[in-house]
Image (tube, helix red, strand yellow):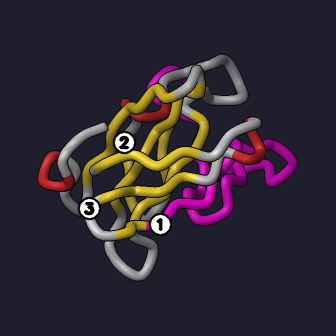
Amino acid sequence: MFPIEECPVGTQRFVSIQGVELAVFHLPRPDGFVAIRNSCPHAGGNLSAGRVANAVVTCPWHEWEFDLRTGACVHNAMVRVQRFPARVEKDWLEVDLSGAGTTVSMQV
């Protein structure tokens, strides 16, 4: 959990909650906050440490690119990173981890 001012537009954060490691990105509107599984499906790279441009994150290990709006790999749509619905409610970021077995709210 972290205060919203620690994740301004154009930045990202690593969050581990209830055993699920997430990369949370604060994109310009209309996208807002996006939460994905932090591990690159190629080799497990730390996606929260990747470069972001035009809503695409580049894995720092082998430069695989993923569209944050869809979770699909830019070069092969069959490869995807798990994306979780996220919304801001007052000062809390709610991330639906039902695909990971749980739903949580965290303060941002």
1 vs 3, front mark = 3
Question: Could you tell me which secondary element the residue under label 2 belongs to?
Answer: strand
User: Which image quarter holds the N terminus?
Assistant: top left
Up-down relation of residue 70 to residue 59 (above or below): below
Residue 5 position, x and y percent, is 12, 54
Quadrant of the rendered structure where residue 102 is?
top right
- Which residue is denoted by mark 2 in the rendering? 51
Distance of label 1 from label 3 (alpha carbons): 10 Å
Looking at marks 1 and 2 on the same chain, the residue that comes earlier in the sequence is marked by 2
Quadrant of the rendered structure where residue 70 is?
bottom right
- Which residue is denoted by mark 1 in the rendering? 87
Residue 80 on the magenta span: yes
Looking at marks 2 and 3 on the same chain, the residue that comes earlier in the sequence is marked by 2
Label 2 close to label 3 by CB (< 8 Å): no
| Of residues 86 and 44, the one drawn nearer to the viewer in this rendering | 86
Q: Amino acid at mark 3?
A: Asp
On the rendered structure, is 42 left or right of 17?
right
Question: Could you tell me which secondary element the residue under label 3 belongs to?
Answer: loop
Q: Which range is magenta?
A: 59-87
Which residue shows up at 32% across the image and 72% down it?
28
Q: Amino acid at mark 2?
A: Arg
Which residue shows up at 80% across the image and 54% down it?
77
- Which residue is denoted by mark 3 in the rendering? 91
Q: Residues within 10 Å of mark 2 (few under 14, many from 20)?
A: some
